[in-house]
Image (cartoon, rainbow, N blue to C red):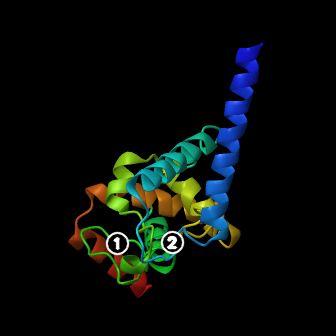
Amino acid sequence: MAFIKHAAIVLLLAALIGASVAGWIILGGRFDVAVSAQLPQPVHDLIHLTRVNAVRREVRDLDARPIDLDDEAVLLGAVRGFESMCADCHQRPGGDPPALARSLNPAPAKLCEAAEKRSVEELFWVTKHGIRMSAMPAWGTTRDDQELWAIATLVARFPNLTAAEYEQMRAAAMAQ
């Protein structure tokens, strides 16, 4: 009985100390919320792990509908969609990060790398629903699923595209 009482007191004290520290940080404005400030690496890693696992959980029951980009009209539409919705923040295949991307924190995903690590379903889900507390918008509020699947399918191909190949597709898409 004494052990339980002692354990309860220790837990209560730990909770009070934790609440006091949290209050000191939150109410005292001691957590740097500036975009120009970097998060401590353990916090960054924890947020990244949370985001990756949350997206993977969300796509488990997703009805996958990758688009056939062999149809040139669909391919060029996907390129136009990427250019209008994504290119201001995400670099094109073989390109440099856009100026806007260099001022965002967290930095926008490098899509050639993301496409190697993520499924087309994950790319679609993030494009449709966005990522909270980042600059990634939820395009599903203004665009239909068909267009978003086409863009996600295009991005999934980015690791296999050269800068010249993408630029040729972009020029053709923008000429229409």
Q: Which residue is mark 1?
A: 91
* Mark 1 secondary-structure assignment: loop
What is the three-letter code of the residue carrying label 2?
Answer: Asp
9 left or right of 163 in image:
right
In the image, residue 121 sits, relative to residue 72, either above or below, namely: above
- Most extreme residue toward the top is 1
Percent across and percent down for residue 149 are 55, 58
Label 2, residues with CA under 10 Å away: few <14, some 14-19, many ≥20: few
What is the three-letter code of the residue carrying label 1?
Answer: Gln
Which circle, 1 or 2, is nearer the viewer? 2
The residue depicted at 21 percent of the width and 73 percent of the height is: 164
- Most extreme residue toward the front is 2
Label 1, residues with CA under 10 Å away: few <14, some 14-19, many ≥20: some
Q: Disc 1 vs disc 2: Cβ atoms closer than 8 Å?
A: no
Residue 66 in view (yes/no): no
The residue depicted at 68 percent of the width and 51 percent of the height is: 19
- Most extreme residue toward the bottom is 175
The residue depicted at 27 percent of the width and 61 percent of the height is: 161
Front residue of this view, candidates 165 and 56: 56
* Mark 2 secondary-structure assignment: loop
Name the image quarter holding residue 62: top right
99 left or right of 73 in image:
left
Percent across and percent down for residue 27 are 67, 69
Front residue of this view, candidates 77 and 59: 59
The residue depicted at 42 percent of the width and 78 percent of the height is: 36
Q: Which residue is mark 2?
A: 32
126 left or right of 5 in image:
left
Name the image quarter holding residue 101: bottom left
